Amino acid sequence: MATDYDSPRKTDEDLSEDSLQELQARRVDKGTSTIDVDPDEVAEGMELPGADLSGEELAVRVLPRQADEFTCSRCFLVHHRSQLAEERNGRLVCKECT
């Protein structure tokens, strides 16, 4: 909930003067506010598993492994050399896989 810090603040006397009916009316007003959501708009952005994506093209630029990177022999992800945990029999292993 956003707070307006520029609005005048209520003192303890002001708070005690609020009647029970006013407080209950405020609670009812806050409870009746709803958010309108169009189910068609929500469903447009969702893809179902097994959907035919043969007509889709990816626009991703793939770079070859750089000199300061390595491929982990366990997870097969390319990591920076700073993530190298160990080398066993010529196999490089990242910190996440140790």
Image: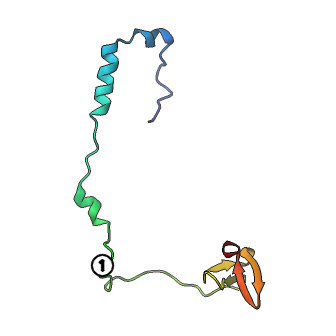
Task: Count residues near mark 1 (Cα–Cα under 10 Å), then give few for <14, some for 14-19, many for 20+.
Answer: few
Q: How is the image coloured?
A: rainbow
Q: Which quadrant of the structure image shows residue 30?
A: top left
Considering the numbered disc 1 on the image, is that residue within a helix, a strand or a loop?
loop
Q: Quadrant of the C terminus?
A: bottom right
Q: Is residue 39 above or below residue 93?
A: above
Q: Quadrant of the N terminus?
A: top left
Residue type at mark 1 is Ala
Q: Which quadrant of the structure image shows residue 14?
A: top left
What residue is at 31 percent from the left and 72 percent from the top?
Answer: 48
* Residue 87: image location, x then y, percent: 77, 84
38 left or right of 67 in image: left
* Residue 93: image location, x then y, percent: 70, 81
Q: Is residue 1 above or below residue 39?
A: above
Q: Nearer the viewer, residue 85 or 79?
A: 85
Return the residue found at the far bottom.
90
* Residue 90: image location, x then y, percent: 75, 91
63 left or right of 7 in image: right
What residue is at 66 percent from the left and 78 percent from the top?
Answer: 79
What residue is at 69 percent from the left and 82 percent from the top?
Answer: 69
Q: Nearer the viewer, residue 62 or 42?
A: 42
Q: Nearer the viewer, residue 92 or 1?
A: 92
* Residue 94: image location, x then y, percent: 69, 77
What residue is at 32 percent from the left and 79 percent from the top?
Answer: 50
Q: How many marks?
A: 1
The residue pinned by badge 1 equals 51
Q: Is residue 39 above or below residue 60?
A: above
